[in-house]
Amino acid sequence: DEISRLIVDICRGLSVVHALGIIHRDLKPANILIAEDGATKIVDFGVARDKSSRLTQPNQTIGSVCYIAPEMWLGKKPTPAVDFYSLGIMLYEMVTGDVPFDDPLPGQMLELHLNGRVIPPWQKNKEVPKWLNDLILKLLEKQPKERPRNALSIIELVDTERLRAENSRVKVRDDEQAPVVNGQSAVNVTASGTITPIRLGSQGERGKTYVFRLRATQVYEEAALQEKARPR
């Protein structure tokens, strides 16, 4: 769905900048742009810094208060985990309509980010799937080491859930029996994800190769089943 695609696009961008040793440090909705062609762009690297940079002074807080990771509030050296925390805040806001922590007083915001309990997203929106609820809570862990280890691990998780969701929608129609070729059922996957039996045609078409494709998170697997003509 749209949220899954957005998570993957953002994490692809983060994987690139993190591999270059750069941390954004100010991820928020205003810095995520979606182009007309659907491409997702991360913008405004104005406060981004190399992981080895010393330009940030000790105890200096950088970023937008609703999206700042706890360690940034304490002026600690940033790691890629600060961007994952901000991503968690954005996702929480997307699925619930609210940020997990909000207060007009900076001191209270500091306390909330450091010690406040996050209400699980599904308690505010029953439509949130378990995997997304768990991912958001993982991203919002107080300790950086408890968050996902890198952006690629997040992409892998989302792709796995996409595949699981797709497979759960795939059902063989009960009103038709799938033909058997070389001991295997030959099926065709339609654009909607529903599997329907392949019509192998008349005996005169024996020997024809039937190819079908199953889309699984941008990976296409092809299989060819050939029924050999038998002497009559």
Image (cartoon, rainbow, N blue to C red):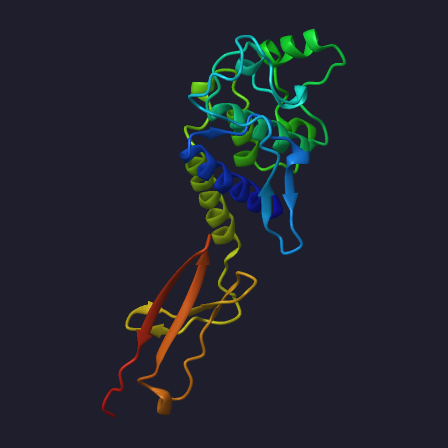
User: In this image, 230 relative to 220: left or right?
Assistant: left
Q: In this rendering, is residue 101 above or below 215?
A: above
- Residue 157 vs 207, above or below: the answer is above
Residue 99 occupies which quadrant of the picture?
A: top right
Determine if residue 147 is in view: yes
Q: Is residue 139 above or below residue 12?
A: above
Residue 125 seen in the current view: no
Most extreme residue toward the left is: 231
What x and y, as percent, mark residue 11?
A: 50, 39
Residue 104 position within the rendered picture, expressed as x and y whole percent measured from the top left: 76, 14
Q: Position of residue 178 (x, y in %)?
A: 43, 71
Nearer to me, 100 or 75: 75
Q: Quadrant of residue 102?
A: top right
Picture residue at 47% right of the left edge, 19% below the top = 144
Q: Residue furthest front?
A: 55
Q: Is residue 105 above or below residue 226?
A: above
